[in-house]
Structure formats: C-alpha cells, structure tokens
Image: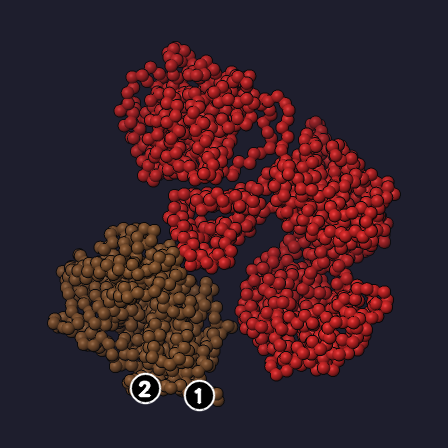
Amino acid sequence: MTNIELFQANKYPLSNGMRLIEASAGTGKTFSLSHLVLRLLTEKEYSINEILVVSFTEATASEIKARIIERLILALKIIESINTNIKPYEVDNVLNEWVELNITSKERALYIASLLLEALERIDNADITTIHGFCSKTLHREAIENGNNLNPTIEKDSKSLINEIVEEYWKKEILEIEISELKGLFKSNFNRKNLIEVLNSLDNDPNNCFKQTFNDLKIEENLSNQLNNYIESLWIKFTTVWEEKGRELEDSFIEIAKDLRSKGIEDTKPYSTKPRKNRYELLSNWIEEYKEKKRPSYEDIQNQTLINKYFHPKNIYQLDMKHKINSCSKGMELILDIIGDLYDSPGEFVWEHALLWTKRELEKRKSKKGLINYSDLLKLLDPKNLHSNEIKDEVNPNNIYRNLEKRYKVALIDEFQDTDPVQFRLLKKAFGKRSSHLLLMIGDPKQAIYSFRGGSLNTYMKAREACDRIHLMNANYRSTKPLILTLNKLFLDGLIRSNLSTQELNPCSQEDKLELNGIKEPFKIINLICNNQKEKSQRIKLDSKSKIEDKIPKVVGSYLLELLSNNPKDLKPSDFCILVNRHDQANNIHSYLSKIKIPSQLLSNENIFTRKGAQILQVFINCIVSPHNQQKLALLACSELMQWKKEKLIKSKFDGDFDSLSSKFYELSKLFPTIGLLGCLSKFLEGKSIADLSNRGTLLGDLYQSSQLVDEQIHRQKFNALRASQWLSSQRFLSIEQIPEEYQPNSAVSNSSVNIITIHKSKGLQFKIVICPYLWQKPPDRKSHLWKDNQNLLISKKYKWNKKYSLFQDFIRKESLNEAERLAYVAFTRAKKQLIVLWANAAGQEGNPLSGFLFGSESINLKIEDHTKEMMENSFTKRELKVDIQDIKITETNKTWIQSKREVKLSLGAIPTHQFENSWGRYSFSKWLTQRDDELILKNLTDELNEDHAFKDEIEDISFQEIDQVIVEKDQSFNRLEDQIWSKESPISDFPRGPIAGTCLHKILERIDFNDIENELKVSTIIEEELNIVNISNSFIEPIIILLKRIANIPLGGPLGKFKMKNLDSKSSIKELKFDIPICHEANPINTLELSSIFREDVQNKYGSDYINKLIDLNIHSSGFLTGSIDQVFADNPNHKIAKWWVLDWKSNWIGNSLSKEHSSSCGPSNYSISKMDEEMYHHHYPLQAHIYLLALHRFLNWRLPDYSPQKHLGGYIYVFLRGLPDEEELEEKNFLQWTPGLIVESAPIERIKKLDLLIKRQYK
Amino acid sequence: MREPLKKIFSTDLNKSLLATLSRYYPPIEFNEALIDIVNILMDGLSRGDIYIDMKKIPKNLELKYKDWPNYHMKALLESGWTKGDNSPIVLNGDLISWRRTHNEIVETIQKILLRNQPINHSSKQLTVRINSRSLEHLNVQQIEAVNLVKSQKIILLSGGPGTGKTSTILQMLLQALTRNPTLNIAMAAPTGKAAKKLKDTIQAGIVDFEDPIKDKLSNIPSKTLHKWLEAGANGFRRNSQRLLKLDLIVIDEMSMVDLSTINGLLDALTKSCQIILVGDPDQLLPIGSGGIWQILQEKETKTNLQSNSVKLTKSYRNKGDIALLRNTLKDEGVDAFWHMLSMKKDSSNTSQYISSLKSIPDPVVRTLFNYRKKLKKLTENCINHIPNEAWQSSMIEVEQSVDILKLFKFIDNLLILCPQRYGPWGVKKIHEFLLGNRFEEEVHKWGEGTPIMAKSNQPEIGLANGDVGIIIGNGEKRRFLFNVFAEEQRLVTRLINPSRLNIFDAAYAMTIHKAQGSEADQVLLLWPSTSKVSEKNTLKNFFSDDYEKRMLYTAITRAKKQLLVITNKEEDF
C-alpha cells in the first residue's frame, strides 16, 4: 500500500497518475471536487472538455455540475474584483488561498479569467454525467465519427419487454403443463412474478452470466414433454436407489443423532436416536402406492413431508452448518443427492428452461428493436469482451478506447465506492495510463451501500491497492464539535465487520451544540426494556423481532411527543429525521405519528400519478366511462373505495347490489359533464367511506389531489369522461423527469413535519436530529433465486449441498451483515446536532450492526442475551464516551401533540416566510359562479367582459361591437339625473379592460403601501414593473398614481365615516388572505337553495331577500373545500381589541357608456351610481362573495382574536370600484356624504354570517 | 358494428392513398387516371368485392377520366404497379385487385387445400356403437354431406335458408361421434347472434335423442370465432404458437366471415382438426376484406374442393312465391325479380306496395302501431308472472312463463327491414316516427314494450350483438327483458338492469345487414328507389348489381311466411 496523506484543496498535486481520495461523510466532497476542477482548468490549463466527471446518480451529477459552475463564477468574480477594486466578495478560505497562489499579476489574472470564461461557455457540453450517460455518449460519438450504424435507443431497463415475453412464455409453455405438475412447480417458488424479477436482474447485471446446468434440456422443444420425461427418470432413479439403500439411510440418520448426542449436542432435530416412527417404512408405503399407477405428480412429491422435512439432504447440511461438523458419510451422498434431485430438480429444470428461453427471446427482440439498456451499454464497452466477435461487427472497442484516451486528460470519479467491476475495468482501460492521464477516484468505502446494484467493496479495495497515492479528507463541516468528538470515539475501532478503518475527523462546523430538555449528550441511546423482562432472573426470554418491531412506532412516537413538548421553543417537527430500513417501517411510523397528530412525511420524490390514489381514481373514472362493464365495476368494488370481499362480490351479482352499483355509475356518467370528476367522487363517497379512507394514510388526499388535477384538464380541454380517463392513464404511465410542483403529492409538501426516510435514500442529506429506531435488527437474509459461482449464476441446486454453495450462502450472509454495518455508519453521520439510537434486545438478532459500536468491537460475536446495559455502559466508560442512555418501557400514549401556543400578547406578527399549503381546495367562489345553468351563461356572457379575475375564456368570441351595443342600450334606459353631478372621467377610464388588466391593477394594489403613497418614486417603480409584466403602456403610470392617491385620501364613508386608507396602520392589515373552508364534509353537499336561505336573515341589511331571486340562477352543489383569497382584511383601529375588522375587495369593473354621442367612450364617477353598482353587485354575485369573505374573516378572528365577539369586532365589507372613485376635492365640493361613487361599504349582517357558518359546517344527521 | 351502405372510404382517403402508393412504389409513368383505379378498388372493398372486372364499366362510381377501361388499363400498365411480386396491384386477366388482399386469399386457399386430406382412420374406432338414427328423413344431398364426414378433413356445406343446413350439421356431428365418441368438438359463427342461433337449433334438434349422445351434443360449446381465437388488441391470442386443441369445428354463417378471421382460424387449428364450413353463398359479403366463402364457391377454386362440397338445394321453407322470387333473383337477376314481383298482384304470401318517399308508408305505419300496441300489452301481461326477486339483479333467471314465451314469439314474428340506417325510409326515420325526433338522446324515456337490440357482445351477462329484447317495467323497476345464454350454454330469460347494457338501439326496424341470421314469419322490406331512370339518384349510385342482388336476396330470405316489399313512386326523384 502507498502512503496516505491529508488532502489539502490547494496543495493537492494535479500530476498524472491513478489516485484516490477517501472522503468521510460530511467532509465537503462536492466542494473539494469543484475546487479541483477549477484548479485543473487554470493551473493545468485543461479545457473543460478534457475533464470527465462521473457520479453515481443523475441527481448527484447535476448537483456537481451546478457546484462547478458556481465555483467558476465565484472565482471569476473575485478576479474581476481584484482588477476593478470593487468591494471584495466574501469567500471561503480555500478560494482566498487559491487567489493568493495563482493571481500573481494583472496579466495572469486576465489570462485565468479568460480560461474560466471559456470553460463556462462550454460547460453545457462538458461531460459531467453518470457512468451510463458516459457510456451512451461514447457509443453515440463513436457511431457518428466512424459512421457505424449504431443508434440504439437507450432504456433504463427492459421491463415492459420482459413482461411481454414472460407472458408469452407462460401461455406457450407453462399453461400447457398439467395442473398437478404445475401446482408442484408453484410450490418451488416458480411463478410469473419471480420469473420476471430474476430475468430483470439477469438483464441488468453486466458482471455475471447465467449458466445452464441441465445438459439434456432443450430450449427449442416443448417443455411439458421434457419435464414429464425428466420427472419420470428421476422417479425411476429414486425408487431403485430407495429400495437398495433406503433402510440404510434411515439407520445412518439414527447414527448421526447418536453421534451428536455423544458429543453433548442436545438439538438433533429432525433426527432422533430412537425415532418413534419408522420413516423408512412410511415412505416405502408411499412409494408402493404408485406401483401400479402412474408416478406421483410433482405436486405429490412436493407435498411429501417425509422427504421435505426428513430425508431431504438440506436437513443434514443445515445440521452440519449449525454445529460446524461434517456428518455426511460418503455412502449416503449418492442416495441423498437422488432424493434432493427428485424434490428440487423438476422445479429447477423448469426455471432453467424458462430463463434460457426468455433470455434468448429478450436478446433477440432487443436487437431487433435496437434497444439497449444500461447493462448492455457497459457490456458493450467492457474491455474484457474486446475479442468477442459479437461486438466486433458493430463497434471496435479498441478504437473507442484510443479515442477516449485522446479525448480526456482527467477523469474524476465521484462515489467510487459503489462502482462495479465492469465499470472499473472500463475506467481503468480508458484512463489508467499513469503517464498521460489523471484518474482520480473519490469515495468512502464506509458508505458503500449499493451492493444490490452490483457495486462491491472488493472492487474498491482492489482499486485502492492499485493507486499511486491516497489522500484523506477529514475536515467535517456537517456536525457540531461535540457530536464529531463522540462519533470519533465511537468509530475508533473502525467498521469491524467490513474490515474498514476510520479516520479521526476534524470538526470544522461553526454551529453550536443543541441544548435540550431531556437530552444530556449529543449521542443518545434509548434502551428499550421489554415488559416481561424480569430483572435478575436466570434465563431471560427475549421478545421476538417482530414483536418488538410492532412496538417501535409507539416508542418513537411517544418519545418524539415527549421531546417536542419538553422543548416547545427549540424544536419543531421538521428538525427530526427518522431513518428506517424499509418502506413498510416508514409507513408504520408515519401512520402512528399521524395518530398522535405529529405531522410527518415520507421523503420521496414522487409523482402523484404514480401513487395508489391515482390508480384507484383510474378505476373509478373507468367505471364512469363504462358503467355497464362488469369487469371494471368488479375491480372498483374490490378496491379501497368499496372494499367488497370476494363473497360479497359473488353474492352481489344476485342480490342486486351489483346492478345498483352499475346504476349508480350510470347516473354519475350522466352527471359527469356538469359536476366533474371531483363532484362524482364526492357524490360517490359518503361520510362513512371517507372516514375509512382518511385512516389509510395519504390515500384520500392523493385521491382528491389527483382528481382535482384531472378536473382541471377536463375543464380546460373540454374532456369527456373517456378522454379524461385516457389522459389520466397517460399521466400514470408517462415518466416525467421533472415532476411539476402541482404533481407532487400534497401529502408530502408540508415543510413543517418530521421526515421519515430510508437510510439508502438519506445518503448525501443531513438533518438536525437523527433518530435511528431499527438498527438493532439483524439484516434479513438475502433471498435470491440464483446463486453465484465465480461469474456464473446458477439456478440449479444440483451442487447445492456441496461446499461451493454453502460458501456462497455464507458469503452473501456476511456481505449483508457488512453492508448493514456500513448503513449504520451512513445513518449515524446524517446527524448535524443530535443522534438518537434505539437499542433493543430481540431474539436472534446477532449480527445487528449496532452491537460493535455500542458494546465494543470485541462483542460482535456475543449472544444477544449477553448484551446487557451494564456491558454497554462499561464499554462506553472504557472508551471515555459520554453517552446519554435512557431506559424506556413500551407504553401506549393517549396524548396527542398540541402545537405549543406561545404565551405572548396577541398582536399581528411578522408575515410568515414559509408557504401555506393552499392548493388542496376546489370550490372557489368563481367555480360556484361558473356552475350556473348553460343558458344563463350564454345570456350573461356579454357582461363578463367587465369582470376582472374569473372568466378568461370565450371572451374573444364576442365581437366588441355587439357588446358595446348592448351596453349603450342599457345606458339609455337609465335615469341619469343623479349621476350628472359627478365628473365623467376616471383617471383610468382608458385603462385596458379584461382579466389581464384587472389582475395587473390588483397586483399593484397588493404591493402599494398607502401610508407611503407620497413616495412617488417608489410607487411609480412598482406600477411600472407591474405594467411591464403584462405589457401595458407606461403612459398609465401617471393616471394610476392619481387613482392610488384617490384611494388613499377618500374617506370611506358609511359605517367607516372619515376613515381613510392612508391612515391604515400596516400592522393592522393583511393583503391577499387565503382561506380554505371545509364544506359539509360529513353531510350532503350544500346547494343553492340552502345557501339562499341565509339572505332571509338581517332584513335591515342590504342585499337581502331581493338577492335570493338572483342567487337561484346559480347551480351550486358542493362539498369538499371552499377556497378563496381576500384582497385585503384590515382593522379600523390600531388597538385590535376595540377595532372592527373589514374585508375589502378591489373591483376593476368597467361600467362606462361606450358609444356616447361624441363616439368616444367615457367611464367615470358619474357612471358609478348606487343603482348601477348594485346592478353590478347582483350580476356578479358579489353579495354572496362578500358573505363568504365575512365568514372566512369571522372564523379567522374566532381563531386568532382573544375574546372575539362578532358584534364587537366584525366590521363589514367594502367593495371599491376603482374606475368610479371621484377626486377627493370633488367629493368635498359636492359635500354629498350619503354615498361615494365607486364605493360600497356595508356593515356585517351578523345573523346571516352565523347561519352561513352553521350551514357550511353542518354535521351528518 | 359497421354501418352498411355508408361510404366507408372517403375520396380524401383515396387521394392520400394514391399519394402514399406513389411514394412507396414510384410509378414508372404517373397518370392521374390511377385515381380512378384506386377509387374503384376501394369502393369494391367497401362492399366486400375483392376482384374488379375491368371489362365492366363501373356504374356506381363517377370516373374522372374517360375511355374506361382502355385508357385506365394503359395507365395502370405503364405505372408498373402490376409488375413483379412486390407491386401493390395484381392484374389477373381482366381482374384487378390489391395485392395485399389477393395474397391473403391465395394464402388462405392454399392453407385450406393443404388441410384437404383424407382422414386416416385411427385404430380405436367404434368403441361405442351409436344408434345412428336412420338417415331416412334426409335427402340425397344431405346424406352425401353426412358421408363426407367419414373421409374428408374439409367439408363445405352450402345452401340457402330453409334447406336444412342445421339438421344436416346435426347428423354430421352424429356421424363424427360414431367414429370416435370422445371427439373434442366446437361450433363457431362470426357473430354472437349466429353462434347463439346455431346452439339453439342444435339444442332443439336433439330433444328426442338418447342420453349419452344427447349429453355430448348439448355440451358442444358454440362461440363467436373471435372468442375462440381470443381476439384482443394485439391480434389473436390463439395462433400457431398456441393451438386450439380441437378435433372438429363447425363454422356456420360462413358468408359473413372475413378473410383475416378465417386465416387466423386456420393458423390456430391443429393439423388433424376436421373443419366443416357452412353457409349461404348468395348472402351479403363481409365489408372490408372480402369473403372467402363466396370465393370458395366459385368454379375455379371449387374444382379442387369439388369432392368436399355439398350444395343443398331442396328448400323446406318459404314455400310458394317467396321461394319463387328467391330463385328468380338468384338465377335471373334483379330485373327479373322486380318484374316478377310486380306481376304477383294477388299472391298468397308476397306483395308489393308503392308509396311516397316523403313519409313512412301506410302499411308500415299500420303494422307498427298494431305491433307496438300488442307488444305493450304482452309485456304488461308478463310482469305479473315475474317473481319479485328477479327485479333485484340482472343475474337472476326468470322462469319462462307462457306469457314470456308468447312475447318473444311475437317479437320474432315481424321484421321491418331497411337497406340503410339513415336517409328516407332508413331505420332512424322509422324510429323517429315512433319514438320522437330526439329518441337517441332520450333513451331513458323509451316506454315499456319498446323492443331493443343489443349492439355489443357482453358475455358477462350473456348478451350477443344483435340480440333483441324488450323494455319492461317503469321507473325504478325499468328493466330489459332478454333471452340470454347463461354460463353453461343454457338459454335463460333475465331482467337486465338498463345500466348494464353497453350500447343498444330500438329494434322496431333494422338494417338488412343486422338482420342477417334472423328470420321472421312476416317481413316488411322498405326498398327505396328501384328506378333506373334517374342518373343522379345518389342512393341508386351506391348499388352495384351484385351488391343489390345480395342485399335483396338476404332481405327476402328472412321471410318465412309473408313478404311485403315497399318501393317508392318514381316521381319522388
């Protein structure tokens, strides 16, 4: 081995050679890597295209790329700042040092800057990629440069093709096999799913090949016959040898048992010194049964427990393994083999036939379609296959490697510990020339956790041997100093199983230790004590693994609850990360946490359409498409939505339930065009099933979210049910690289919840507090249908009972223990401030990854019973480790988490910086409006031109002429007397109409601070920005300023008297308040009639029973959520205890007279009389909107304002018609204070709001 | 279901087809007259005609270029599109056809001929002696057919309606079973309705048989060809890789089987499987790819299969003038038929009525009103005899009371046939007349007693495309009364919930295509325009002689007892 040095970012030699950097977790690997690229570009003057950077996943590769770009830009800026003497940037020491070393003169600086600029220019073409990306790029290049006709389509895997082939094989061969044989086959683990799985793994494995072992197996020929003959021959062999040696075998088993007993071994199962049954006789009798008849079917053989549990050789070998003896005598081997053959080989025979056939077919079809997958890519470039003729025709690898050598000078390999042998061969062949290339590998063997993808530590260790120099990165920037010091001691002995040493890390993080109530040290162990564990009793009966595992969610949950409530100020749920081994564990913890009301999320970058909810939705919508289709309905009936059992389904065909289901969907299909998918869904789900669904984790949420997305498309693209179903299914099977934000499951969007994630996925991430609740478990034995001998994969266990097979079994068992240890290392190093590990003594968990770390390296082979708390404490004392050990008994908690309420005086605080989840709802006010009857929509279309937000469609269709005509007619019929006194022009009368312009005005109003209205520069900047966004002429800046001043200075009048917007304290106002009101979640949907009834209350208030008639036009039928956003909510007094609260809505509606006699349009205060505004209010159902807004405010205040009383605090609503506001002076001049044009200010009708409140939250009766 | 008589191939399609052809097979000499050839070939396909005789001037199409066929023949030859093995068009004497379909036909015939070998009798014969009922009641042709079963692998049995095809099939099956009682036998037909009917008649024919053989015969499954072949989105799932293990298969209504289906079937059958093809060669051709049955009946091909073919000519049904008319039509053509019909003023069971196209003819109106009234009454009678639980579910069997039998018998009594769905005297017009102009949207308003026809196969509830049932009950209890096949191939009556039906239509009248395979005592045929005076008559343009003949033939042979043909007055055009 070569010498090991510490890595120093600026001193690291860039000379050629093969080198390795070992970077422990949290040592700033990506940072160093990008700095090295910077150095290579400048100091060695390599072009960016001569540098290859390879990482493990697409995600890491693109992160590295981003970091490199960042680094180069930063360097460039510093160089520029030196030259121009602008104030220097704040940069890290490494870069400062680099500048000092390299920027020696002005000329030099310019030169380096030019190099960097060039690199940045070309960085898009730079090869910063994954190994597979690199391979495919290489092949493509080769194809282009040599004119080879090689333009393969690259697929990640061939899953769909495999499914297709297996399906075919199944029909062609398997279904032709007789049923009794088939049943036996299925017992031997042969089934479609396993076949697909094994074939897939073979297809994706570039390192190994499958080997045929049954020599007389012919793939071409019919399997059924071959199998029949084969079993026949096995049977004959078996019966002959049994007759001859059966009795002898039974005797030898008894001898073995005696022998073991004499050695003091009690457990001789299944053999016994004095067996009660004569098993030889029993089996002979069984054989006798078939003397006359046909041989037993394979099912009969598989069902013969005498063979399986007693005579089968696996029993004796298991015994041998257990006691590490060799009791099998030569004489027995023959008969044992034959028995084993009879039992196992027919299954294996079929397996082999299936694998060979499907594999051949797969290759055939892939080459026919020109498909290539990742593993084929590697195989194609594998230097080991250089001489294989197959490839020679298409590509000449020699050329490829020559070209690669020429193209690149440096190869940087990130995450090298996960490299597999082929990949390494490839890299070594291409860049291994020490004289001309720098092959730099960066990795951490302790984090090698991808052996299931073919990566193996052996490859890494071999490469390590071959390296010229090895450097270490040991400065940790991730975790706090106390935690690092603890971990240093904890890992002092290295990873014992994996035989890896650790380096002491140098803590560099500036962050402070976390002081928490209930935790004494940064490393904490929760010692789980079983309830039945009696202290000091002689033999402790340990709980089983599954028993303890069942309790873990409760333990973790109650502990979290305790921590959170003991540290209400310092801890948020999002500080925690729970690391699990498997997804089901994640789900268990997630559902328990939701039970005790701690928010949590499963971290995964998922598309909502790939989830179960979308799948169920598909089934649902399919039923709407074809309510007559029995199959589809049955599928739905058995899904989570209905949960019919099989019996129920069968019965339903006769008791009529099935017909009613069909009728139900028939009805829904009729309703679908009017109520949409979500409407159908809520109609279909009644209270009961919703409650059940919401217990099923995120299912209900996912279901709603995906149907909302589908509805959006239905609305936008005018889909019918069939098209909607097709759209959904295309979304479900379409793989999108970048998942749009709205497609990410809402159930995981929340950013204030506990993270739950598998350790594999956690790689590269960091969390404030890490909890590892499952590390006490021994990793499960890896089950594999194939086993490996050298590079050969075998299905046949013909050699199963020989040494090679047991060696292999032993090897993979050890491998998985080793990997578990490394996973534990990865888990521990995710923590920034606090690490909490759970320890439990569970039966049979020897080999768990924790015992070495917690009980000292010498204890890894101890029995699990001997892992006592004393021992743990001793071990820690010996290592001078300060650990907080806490005993916890498993108790169920009845408590739930209540977010701490701060004991502070209530006032409006800072505006929250984190986003609110608000995309869940569906029935917005405008949605209600669009649900009016078809004819009405037509009739009212013309007027909608005026409305600001909601209606964007169809407007273009109507010619302006026509609309104008309508308006003129209306105008002339109007009494103008009272209007005449007001001016005809508003400053913004010419301002464009329509939704875009309206939104623009809203945006401006949202950003403007009326206190600061005199600051013209600021105001005009805002206006200009907003106008530019929507491309409206800047000439409107001035008019809008005038308008804003009017708004600010006009006394609002009515109940608000002289209150002016400019006097409004900014702390007393909330703009764009969003709300979600659940509607009738347990009862029938709310409908128009019910809604209109509220207007019978409060007769003294405006918009009462006269409004009911208008409201009836709407076709409201909603349940779910009502969402919306209020333009502004404010309090009319800075003392919030006595203030009244108001909702304010800006309206940009245009009520001008367009074609007046002068043929120019006008629109101003004179047009906005009370009657005309009322008409507008009615027409757009603003009264309804106002009441909903008031309800939202009512609930909001009820929640936030202590001692809230509607009579005291609920003010009312204000509608500001912007185009109608008069000048302040004009207003004073007219001295007409009963009303102000453009303003509608009304007190809250409290009875109505109360009734609406009841109506909307009504319970199921 | 394919709509007959609609122009399936638009001229735009033909134009782009020509353009595509020119791209793939660049013609040596391009001539725009080729569009006429493409048009004619495509038009032929839409009626099922594969071979087009260049010598005949196409009546049904407007040619873009004059001087047919010389000019066109020249253009075709110069284009080089008929030369070589890969050319798109085959020229065979004066006949032209698409190579694709031609090859398919050649291939199919080849496959049939290959299978056409004498049966080698296996040693295990006659283990059970079946008391084969005397063949006395069979005529010579039928006996000949039955004898063929002993020796031939391929048997073609053709004959018009009422010639006793089904009873012959029954005897043939019996014969086969005498040879070997363990034979694996299947029955097939192109449509669900036909398959059902075949099963039905066999079932009815074996009532008097004795038990082991009766059992065997009644258990022979009868399914559609597509069902046997397990047709799916990706073609047939029964194919040469996965054979259908059958010893004998009977395919009825061969005239409706198209090329690709029979081709698929031949691929999926084992070499040893005996095939009995049954059909009426004079009926309508399948649309699209042409019918193999009609080609097999042609003289050239038949020479090879002469010894395997039996033609039943003795008719046991539609005696009297219907038979006479049928024979005239078959032997002497359309004109003779019309002539004869107009002569038969006082015939016992056939008559002609002339009416204006502008309204539904009086006899139809009268018949329909009576029919509707009677249906309603019969349906109401049925309700009392249906047990309460039967309303609960579509899967419950209803005992066939006398009333129900009566009802179905009455439904089967009458067929009102139109050549087309749309246009004057189309099916739609008649239904609009009875059910209102918006009848298609107001399905839920169709009252009790409205006959309806299922328009898709729904095996899960036993329905076949073309099955006719009737609406029974009102409101919550509105159901569709159907005779369906239960799982065990038994015919049962069920009350089917309306929501369970995929597509259906009213069934007061139906198109001739839809009626293929049905029969009724009384048939009313609405046949707009028999006139040849008007050249611009679009309806008329659509019929080629042969097509018209087949159409008429199919229509009139539906009648068992009475036939009324209604034609329009000439001045309508």
Does residue B492 show up? yes
Residue at image point 61% right, 21% down: A905
B155 lies above or below A68: below
Numbered tag placed on residue A986 in the rendering: none
The residue lying toward the viewer, choosing from A107 and B306, is: B306
Picture coordinates of residue A457, whole percent (x, y): 76, 55
Q: Is residue B61 left or right of residue A347?
A: left
**Quadrant in which the C terminus of chain A is drawn:** top left
**Quadrant in which the N terminus of chain A is drawn:** bottom right
Picture coordinates of residue A659, whole percent (x, y): 40, 55
Q: Please give the chain letter of the residue carrying mark 2.
A: B
Picture coordinates of residue A14, whole percent (x, y): 78, 46
Specify the colour of chain B: brown
Q: Residues within 10 Å of mark 1 (few under 14, many from 20)?
A: few
* Marks 1 and 2, the one that precedes in the sequence: 1
Q: Mark 1 points at which residue?
A: B126
Does residue A419 show up? no
Q: Mark 2 points at which residue?
A: B135
